[in-house]
Amino acid sequence: MYEAYSANEVAMKLPLEITSLACQRSCGSVFTGSKVGQLFVYSPKRTGRRGFDLDNLCKQFERKAVQDLAVCEEAEVLFCVSDGQMAAHCLKNRHYPVIAILPKVKPVHCYATWIREDSHVMYIFVSSKKRLSLFKWIDKDFHEVRFEYNQSFTDKPSTLRVVANTLLLSCGREYLLISLTETSTEDEESWCGECRRLFEFSDNPAILEIGDRNLLGFSHGDSLVLTNFQGQKTPLADLRFSDVPVDLVYDSPYVVALLPRGQVEVRSLNPPYLIQSMVLSKAALLSPGNAGYVFVSGPFDVWMLDAHSNIRKNVSLLVAEKQFDLAIQIAELSNVFSDENKLEIKRQAALNLFQRKKFEESFMLHAEIKTDVITIIQMFPEFLPEKLQKKAAAFDLPANDKKRALLALGNYLSAVRSDLSKQLDHHNREKVNNQSTLNAEDLKNLHISLQVVDTALLKCYLQTRPSLVDSLLRLHNNSCFFEDAESILLAENRLPSLFILYESRKKHEMALELLKTQAQDPDSDPFFHGFNQTITYLQTLGNTHLELICKYARWVLDKDIDSGLEIFIGEESEVARNLDRQAVFAFLRSNYVAAVIPYLEHLVYTWKETRQVFHDALAEYYIIRVKLLFQDYVHTFPDDENIIRVGDEDGELGKMRRQLIKFLQYSHYYSPQAVLLQLNNCVFYEERALLLGRLKHHEQALAIYTSILNDFESAEEYCRIYYDRNDEINSQVYLCLFRAFVKPSDPIIAGILEKDLPTPEPDVLSAIRVLNRHADKIDTAYALQLIPTDTLLSTLSKALHTVLQTTQDSASAFALQRSISARGIASHRERLRHVLSQRIVVGNASECCKCGKRIGNSAFVRYPTDGSLAHFGCHKDTSEKIPS
């Protein structure tokens, strides 16, 4: 395809046969081991010219042929295998003396070094006589480490390579993978290996680590099988060579294979092309150098394959032939090209991918190089705002290809929008701390880009993924051009989506008008049916939009009072709870009287409203409603019918009176006097009694129970509620009840003007019953004076007994209290006499037991337990620190 490498001479016609080859990457030196044990070291010319000079010749390197060489710069060691024995030579000494020899293992067939990433310690796996051994390189010597594995080898393991925590090897005709696990204890380091067979192979085994792609390559006949690091096959195609490779080297992005008869073949991994083929006389060994360099040796010659010399020419050729994948790989690995050159290649590659209808790959590449998103959208002019469409050139695609392109575009735009959104969020966070790095122009461009992207994404989703439209519109920073989005959604008849647009942009009146018109249309989308959407929306608006809330609450209240009321009292909305309650009350009172009582009840009972205006209003509307219902009810009432007790009325009247009584008992925030004035003179007896009780007009209230209702139990319950022995008026409530029975009052004192209510006769028996039950709460001496003189003594006997018993109990309790008090006073006097009789001497030597300073003329305290003294201030400070 092209000349990837140029072959440059390193050393030609050496006097001794080369048996091994290695490279020291830090300095670019090449090591060649000979058949007689000598070591040749060639280094790049220092004059700046190309080529290599013989830098060193170590004639006493080994006694026999150097079978293998490996440079380990991390440990400054040159490993060597000669005559089946492994040795470590010092890399820093020009004579390369032997540091350590591996005596226990011989012959060594092959080995692999491994430097652990966590500890940076070097380990060496060694294959010898059908077994594996593990050594650790510490203190310039080999230290054997216990290594157990679950595999018996039928042949000597060869071609060892360690990748991460995995040992890969070939044995016989198959490749094996051993997972390494450390099983060390405090006393001994040990490792175990779990062996797994991968697959069989033929001919020469070889294992390549392709690190930049997280791949492994296994030689199998004339092919290179590609797997991941776990040995599992990948989607990438295997590489096939012209013959069975003798040796393999990976030099990104190429695999260099040495074939029989000195043929060197260069192939790319992805795409798997034959790039170059050359013949180097009797070439037998390969060794990787620095990136872009591979060393080749024959029996007496050494070459360097250089990928840098033709790199510009090769990339230009690949771009011209539209082989962009390979061109990008080569350009990225080279420092010859500027960043702008690399970006231009990728732009052309992305355009080529689009033209080849590989839309997903094209947009991924555009995302990688951060192409201006507006430039991308210009390939689809219909997705741009009108003012930008004139400059755009559309691609003419068939329908199926257009759909695939739009799907890929949607994924791309979604990723771009996510990135733009993160930039804006980051700016907003930094802005709070005055640390923003974006200037006004950058911020403006960022907003414009987001607007264009969101509008294009909306149009794209409508054609490819309609289900994602609503999610896009709900995003907190959705920036679609409003007019464009509105017209698009109307044209597509996506009215629920249009509502979401209005809602997200806070176009409240437009959203509510849409909800209203669509709810009244029987053929509208089910999304709009009923009141729920309107109610929920109105509950989110708050006091700043109260006028709007009232305006669009009307049609809901017109349809259903209970549903409309939810707008103002919904428990799921904290906003509704915080609405201006007086304004809401005024709105309901003026327009929807039927909603007033439920609204006020919710304020009082659920939200615990304490302002008097609402409590007075609720009482007022209860009374108005009860009066209206009572007018209808009283017409069906016979003239001689007895008084019906509160709540016993049929239908709504009974229910409403029960609600009124409940409220009058529950609330403490209405004005009893104001409510009392609203009550009719001839009805609502229980209500009047409750209100009179709140005003502490107990005589009037009890007159209703005793003179009109004739209800002893209710009168007694009334007294129980209001009795308070510490209150001057409420402490006399039982006496008032007693007096109401023995000296009944005219009902007119309770404000009852009905002419047919006579003054009742005294009820001595009921009065005596009060005395029997509550003598301890009544001034009995005064009460007995009120009993008529003609009352039989036998009638009073039981009451007198109760009075006497109560008097005796009171006297006994008072005597006991007096005795206890007297005893307490005597005790305190005795303690005071004892304290006064004690002498306290304060001299110059007297010190405070708290601070250690002298008492002097300061105020002090004396502790009775041990007689110690303390400053009054110190004692006070100590007392305050002690928790109560």
Image: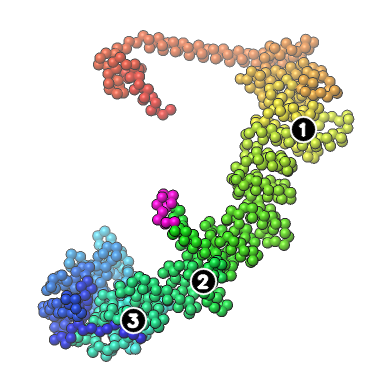
The kind of residue on which mark 2 rests is Lys
What is the residue that sits farthest to the right in this orientation? Answer: 639
Nearer to us of marks 1 and 3 is 3
Left or right of residue 549, residue 623 in this image: right
The kind of residue on which mark 3 rests is Asn
What residue sits right under mark 2 in the picture?
Answer: 391
Over which residues does the magenta segment extend? Answer: 430-440
Disc 2 element: loop
What residue sits right under mark 3 in the picture?
Answer: 314
User: Closer to the camera, 581 or 163?
Assistant: 581
Q: Earlier in the sequence, mark 2 or mark 1?
A: 2
The answer to whether residue 149 is above or below residue 549 is below
Q: Earlier in the sequence, mark 3 or mark 2?
A: 3
Q: Position of residue 858 (x, y in %)?
A: 32, 16
Disc 1 element: loop
| The C terminus: image quadrant | top left
Answer yes or no: do the residues labelled 1 and 3 have beta carbons within 8 Å? no
| The N terminus: image quadrant | bottom left
Disc 3 element: helix
What residue sits right under mark 1 in the picture?
Answer: 646
